[in-house]
Amino acid sequence: METDILENLSLIAKTKNLENGTVVSTLQQALVNAARKYLNIQKNIEADIDAQAGEIKVYLRVTVVEDYPDVLPEMTAEEVAALDEKYMLVSEAQDYNEDAVAGDYLEMEIPIENFGRAAIQAAKQMLLQKVRDAEREKIFEDYQHRVGTLVSGTVQQVDRGNILINLGKTEGIIPLKEQIRKERYRQGDTIRAYIANVSTNVKGPQVLLSRTHPELLARLFELEVPEINDGVVIIKGVARDPGFRAKIAVSTKDERIDPVGACVGMKGNRVQAIVRELSNERIDIIHWSEDLNVYIRRSLSPANIRQITDIGDGRVVVIVADEDLSQAIGRGGQNVRLASKMVGREIDIYGQTEFDNMPVEERDALLKPREGAIPQTAETTGAAASSGKFSELESLFSKKKPEGE
């Protein structure tokens, strides 16, 4: 009987991907509960399991006393109960050994076959529940360590706008707010998503997935671009309007490598694979720079930027050529909003004519630095204009543009 139980335990541990020790300790607790129910006592009972020999022994182990030992005032009720379990009064002990006297250590084996069907069934139910709990805990730990990574699964169902994903061992969910609005999925479709969070509820681990998280884009580039996966090219920032447009900034310390070109790939094959994965989301790949002015110019490229003023307090005023104003702002402010997220500044954009026609007082107030900030103004000249992905012709055009035009 014991051998069969242990063999079944090993099979459970293997099929449920659990540590054998977890299942064995659960069986021990289940046997202790069954023995206490059989004897109808709340005393120290221990289950010894020898997996190699295939033996299971259950013992009552207590010290016989005339009276229970004194307890400390600061002890809790649970601590007092745990202490009392280790002792048994002489009158009680003599029910099991008529020769028992105070000071004896009573150890008595309790035959498992005497527990009865009800006790065995209760132990079985506890074991199964513990196994389920341990399985859920392991799944939770496994997926908790995978937060921030990609996962693939199959659409199980769409429930009130939420997409339930079968991940194999557990279920993932993509809430409506984490979905790309123009995407539609059916049962059985394969889907790839970003693990944003893992939590637990009464049903077990719940894996929160996202198709809109900026890091989804970063993880996809890591998969498609070997230079990123190897650490040669580094992702410095990501901003997304999911399903429509995104910006990603990349850099490298290896001067022989063009980080933007590496991400684009031969004939655009690398970036196009990501664009298709994200339902034709337009992706701007930007060469990151530690120079804020250069970084802003690249983030708003190809708009012709005339002036950048960092007025502090997280705000930057940008003046662009009139013909590029709508392009710099983007539809519904999309382009400047994404650029702001990329550079970590709130960008206020004005056309050159609009800025020039402002009253002097209004213009001065606009460019007045915030308290404690040092204003930084950069015209589109020299290295600031020519560095990055700007052509030499664009740089010369910006330098020679007549003032006020």
Image (spheres, rainbow, N blue to C red):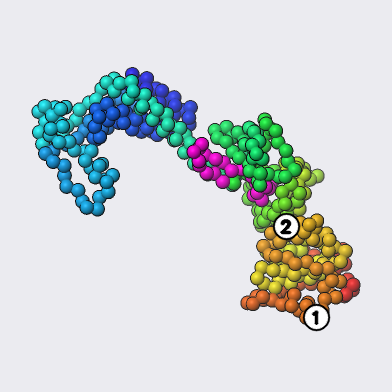
Residue in the picture at 36% in, 24% down = 121
Taking 254 as reference, is 128 left or right? left
Indicate the position of residue 375 as horizontal and vertical percent values: 70, 75
Give the CA distance from mark 1 to mark 2: 30 Å
Residue in the picture at 31% in, 31% down = 33
Provide the secondary structure element on which disc 1 rests: helix
Relative to residue 84, is residue 334 depicted above or below? Answer: below
Would residue 187 be visible to someone looking at this image? Answer: yes
Quadrant for the C terminus in the image: bottom right
Q: Confirm whether the magenta stretch covers residue 217.
A: yes
Q: Earlier in the sequence, mark 1 or mark 2?
A: 2
Indicate the position of residue 245 as horizontal and vertical percent values: 75, 51
Q: Residues within 10 Å of mark 2 (few under 14, many from 20)?
A: many
Q: Nearer the viewer, residue 313 or 383?
A: 313
Quadrant for the N terminus in the image: top left
Q: Residues within 10 Å of mark 1 (few under 14, many from 20)?
A: few
Relative to residue 346, is residue 125 depicted above or below? Answer: above
Would residue 150 be visible to someone looking at this image? Answer: no
Residue in the picture at 37% in, 32% down = 26
Q: Which residues are magenta?
A: 197-222
Q: Amino acid at mark 2?
A: Leu
Q: Nearer the viewer, residue 324 or 366?
A: 366
Relative to residue 122, is residue 387 depicted above or below? Answer: below
Residue in the picture at 69% in, 68% down = 315
- For the residues bearing labels 1 and 2, Cβ distance under 8 angstroms: no
Indicate the position of residue 344 as horizontal and vertical percent values: 67, 62
Indicate the position of residue 321 as horizontal and vertical percent values: 85, 67
Q: Which residue is mark 1?
A: 360
